[in-house]
Every structure is written in C-alpha cells, then in structure tokens.
Amino acid sequence: MKMSPDTANPRRDRVTYAAAVKLVAIFVAIALVILFGSMAWMSGCKTGAGQGALDNCSALQRNTLAIGPAVTLLIGGVWAFIRTYQVWRARGGWWIWQGAGWFLLMLMLLVLGMTAPLALLS
C-alpha cells in the first residue's frame, strides 16, 4: 500500500483538519479542567510552600494532580493515532491526524514533567 497522501480533494483535507483541531481543543480543555480542578481541590490541604507543602493532602488528591491531565492527553493522542490509521485506510489526509497525535503526546510529556514532581515528590 502506498502511504502518500491523496491530494485530489482539498475540501476533504479541510474537514479533516477542522476535526483534528476540534479533537485537540477538546482534550486540552478537559486536561485543563482536571488540572485546575485538582489544584483547587488541593488548596484546602496545602500548607505553605516548598518541600512538604502537600504532606497533608491525600494520595488521591496528589495522584489526580500528578497524572490526571497527562492521562487525558495520552488518551487524546492515542485516539488521534487511531484516526490516523482509519483515515489512511480511507486514503485521506492522514498526516493531519498524525500531527494532532504527536502534539497531544508531546503536550502530555510536558504536563507530566511539570505536575508529577510537584505532586509525587514533594
């Protein structure tokens, strides 16, 4: 099978692009809601700043902050890669979905790198 994109239908590519952007926006919004929601949930148990500030918080609160947003972005990335394969099989603009998947996975690594040390190692 040939993996080159079908460029004969630019309208279909615009629709695919809009769907990929919509998926990315939805998963980023859900991850932000989980991030800010868990931060608000932890505000009652946080004591000051620095090391040991989250010692009074439960494991569920700390784990929600540490991996909740990252897992959401991982699910979005996997979903985008599944769509990549489906669109490739239909000979459409698969590279658009692949870009969305890589964007979500890179964002997941960034978020995980920022939240996991804060919540799990403090």
Image (cartoon, rainbow, N blue to C red):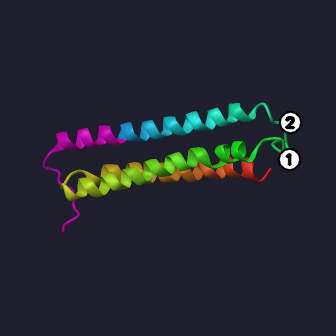
Q: Residue at x 78, y 41 (%)?
A: 57
Judge by depth and name the residue closer to the eye, 102 or 37.
37
Residue type, numbered disc 1: Gln
Q: Residues within 10 Å of mark 2 (few under 14, many from 20)?
A: some
Q: In this image, 95 relative to 59: left or right?
A: left
Q: In this image, 27 relative to 82: left or right?
A: right
Q: Position of residue 5 (x, y in %)?
A: 21, 56
Q: Residue at x 81, y 36 (%)?
A: 46
Query: Which segment is the magenta one?
Result: 1-20
Q: Position of residue 97 (x, y in %)?
A: 33, 50
Q: Residue at x 21, y 58 (%)?
A: 89
Q: Position of residue 40 (x, y in %)?
A: 69, 31
Q: Residue at x 69, y 45 (%)?
A: 60
Q: In this image, 45 relative to 27: left or right?
A: right
Q: What is the quadrant of residue 3 in the picture?
A: bottom left
Residue type, numbered disc 2: Thr
User: Which of the numbered marks, if any, corresponds to residue 51?
Assistant: 1
Judge by depth and name the residue closer to the eye, 9 or 1.
1
User: Which of the numbered marks, if any, corresponds to residue 35?
Assistant: none
Q: Position of residue 66 (x, y in %)?
A: 66, 48
**Dot 1 lies on which element?**
loop
Q: Residues within 10 Å of mark 1 (few under 14, many from 20)?
A: few
Q: Outermost residue, left direction? A: 8
How far is disc 1 from disc 2 in space, using C-alphas?
10 Å
With respect to residue 106, does 2 lie above or below?
below
Is 96 covered by the magenta stretch? no
Mark 1 vs mark 2: in front: 2
Q: Quadrant of the N terminus?
A: bottom left
User: Which of the numbered marks, if any, corresponds to residue 47?
Assistant: 2
Is 12 covered by the magenta stretch? yes
**Dot 2 lies on which element?**
loop
